[in-house]
Image (tube, grey):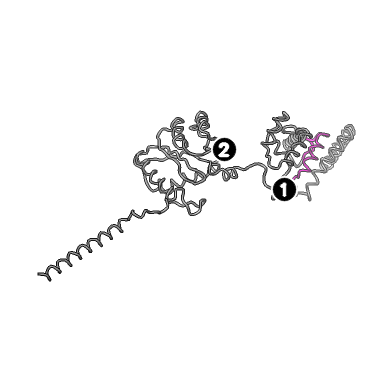
Amino acid sequence: MIVLLRIVLRLLADLAGLIALSVRPRRAIEAENLVLRRQLALFKERGMKPQRIDAATRASLALLSQLCDWRSCLVVVRPETVLRWHRAGWRLFWRCKSRPGRPPIPLELRQLIRRMATENSLWGEERIANELLLKLGLRVSPRTVRKYMPKRPPGRPRGDQRWSTFLRNHARAIVACDFFVAVTATFRLFYVLVLIEHGSRRLLHFNVTEHPSADWTLQQLREALGCGDFRYLIHDRDSIFARSLDESIRNLGLTVLKSPPHSPKANAICERVIGTIRRECLDWLIPMSERHLRSLLKSWVEHYNEARPHMALGPGVPDPPPAAVRPATQLSRHQIGGRLVLCVKSILGGLHHEYSLALELA
């Protein structure tokens, strides 16, 4: 009897649901059916765990949920998950609709950039941007010019000059400088300024100070570069190299080249010689004072310039010894000593001969 009553109540509930469905719009009922079928398709058999929802299923459920009361027909996911899908869909929609970045330049200007780059193969983006600004009054960034330049075919040289190419072509006219730190036995901190020539790899100048400043650095550069035939000076962007210091260096006839920030490879020759000083000199000796440190560096710099071969220069050294051309009148100590021995022997031999002759006469 109780089972029969339950069946009757279930039939009455289904009848009420059917009446309610007849009142609802046909479109909403069809959307709800699709949602339920979509979730049912995730189950292979009764009682099995549903499959993982893929992107296509997420998109279809998110779209169909807008056409019906989706909260009452969810089975495999929670309502918060569907809301998250909605937000992700709106973000994707506005991302596709909005176009980030600057608008493209006109087509005529793009064609002009390609034509200038094709007809002038030695021009880089900087030169083309300057030509457009000076002659046509069009302000275009060099990065934008590089974006629309035609791709360089393989085997064809670059139009602009790389940093390594510039250093190699002007090595004899370039001087590089940099600071490094040395600590004494009493834990005093000293700064060492080093200047090196790129062409001969000769250490041109060095000095030690405890309190470096722009005026002190300028005085050292004047002493080292005042009488040399150099055109370029490379240094980093340290605050010691102030703007007034660069202007004073330009008054000496040199062009100041600042290396990019955090780019030690742009001043590789000077950085390498600083590493050589540490490995071959300061890592083996502990200076006691500023005077002792200066004496150590002076001895090592003389060795570096006069006796140390350089791989980049072949078997030679920056300061080769002069030709061993000795005057005829200049004799070595061994030759002088040998001649003195011969003279003494000849004198003693003569005296012995004269003494024997006198005995015979007597």
Residue that carries the numbered disc 1 in the rendered image: 153
Residue ranking furthest to the front: 361
Crowdedness near tag 1: few (<14), some (14–19) or many (≥20) residues, C-alpha within 10 Å: few
Residue 76: give its label. Answer: none
Q: Where is residue 42 in the image (x, y as percent from the top left)?
A: 78, 46
Q: Which one is in front, 321 or 102?
A: 321
The label nearer to you, 2 versus 1, is: 1
Crowdedness near tag 2: few (<14), some (14–19) or many (≥20) residues, C-alpha within 10 Å: few
- Quadrant in which the N terminus appears: top right
Residue at point 41%, 48% (across, down):
303
Helix, strand or loop at label 1? It is loop
Q: Position of residue 131 (x, y in %)?
A: 70, 33
Residue at point 39%, 48% (across, down):
284
Q: Position of residue 76 (x, y in %)?
A: 75, 42
- State which quadrant residue 215 falls in: top left
Range drawn in magenta:
50-74
Q: How far apart are marks 2 and 1 (CA)?
A: 29 Å
Q: Which one is in front, 117 or 11?
A: 117
Based on the picture, tell me whether residue 72 belongs to the magenta stretch.
yes
> Closer to the N terminus: mark 2 or mark 1?
1
Q: In this view, does 237 lie to the left or right of 75?
A: left
Helix, strand or loop at label 2? It is loop
Q: In this view, does 308 lie to the left or right of 125?
A: left
Residue 260: give its label. Answer: 2
- State which quadrant residue 72 falls in: top right
- Quadrant in which the C terminus appears: bottom left
Q: Position of residue 134 (x, y in %)?
A: 69, 30
Q: What residue type is labelled 2?
A: Pro
